[in-house]
Amino acid sequence: MRPIVQISLDLTDIDEALETAEMAMRAGVDWLEAGTPLILAYGLVGVRELRSAFPGVPIVADLKTMDGGYLEAEMMAKAGATHVVVMARAHEETIKCVVNAGRDFGVKVMGDNLGCPDMVAAAKWLEDLGCDFVIHHIGYDERRGIAAQGKRMPSPLDQLKEVVQAVNIPVQAVGGLTLEQAIRCPEFGAPLVVLGAPLTIDADAFKTAGGALEDSLRLICEKIHAYDNIKI
């Protein structure tokens, strides 16, 4: 598949999120993500605002669903989301419920393996349960906590190739990647490249980072889109 660039709107102000999304679209970003902070702050309203402002653009609702899967997916689909996120550590029935809702309401399901003891096995399990995408994810708190102990901070690149080889659905790597690492994700066979904290969003304040962000995003998008189609 053609590499996809997704920007994670991990913001707590809807006006800033809309402005950032508009800038990202101008720069060549393909998908918008209503990040968890935005969903916590505005819920369905935030997703509706994004859908109203950007008709036809894929919108990922990063729900991190752990229970009540069908209803959460249904609500976000009706608000305008095209993709929803369920956690691999949720109960099997919850994942099945989200997958069923995805089929009923025409949204794609992204399964997130954050916090799983065996990340590769979890990715395969998510595929087996019917997820359309795998998010290979090293969490924000996990990374910072391990770094605070003076240890090497884990990276999704550590096992990205193994995850990609284990599944037949597209993979996205998330969690502490540098710009250079994010741009190279398609080389690992992961065509869904997400840009967010700390790449384009201030990781501590959850607001748009300073600097010539649009120019940087445009260059990033050009580099990622220059990759040939990724086989999955």
Image (cartoon, grey):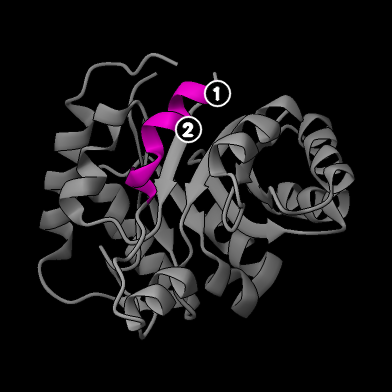
Q: Residue at x 49, y 54 (%)?
A: 33
**Magenta stretch mostly in which secondary structure?**
helix
**Residue 167, which numbered label?**
1
> Residue 7's x, y, as percent?
37, 53
User: How far across and down, in percent of the image, does residue 143 sit?
Assistant: 40, 69
- At a point 76% along the width and 36% down the height, the residue shown is 102
Whether residue 214 sits left or right of residue 88 in the image: it is left
Asked which secondary structure carries label 2, the reply is: helix
Image disc number at residue 120: none
Asked if the residue under mark 1 is in contact with the one under mark 2, i.e. CB atoms within 8 Å, the reply is yes
Residue 103 in the image, given as x and y percentages of width and height: 79, 29
Q: Residue at the location (48% across, 41% down)?
A: 57
Q: Quadrant of residue 108?
A: top right
| Three-letter code for the amino acid on which mark 2 is drawn | Val
Q: Is residue 142 above or below residue 70?
A: below
Q: Which residue is mark 2?
A: 163
Region in magenta: 156-167
Against 231, residue 172 (above or below) is below
Q: Is residue 232 above or below residue 48?
A: above
Residue drawn at x 17%, y 77% as measured from the top left: 210
Question: Mark 1 belongs to which amino acid?
Answer: Val
Pick the quarter of the image with the N terminus.
top left
Residue 41 seen by the camera: yes
Left or right of residue 141: residue 49: right
Magenta segment: does it hold 66?
A: no
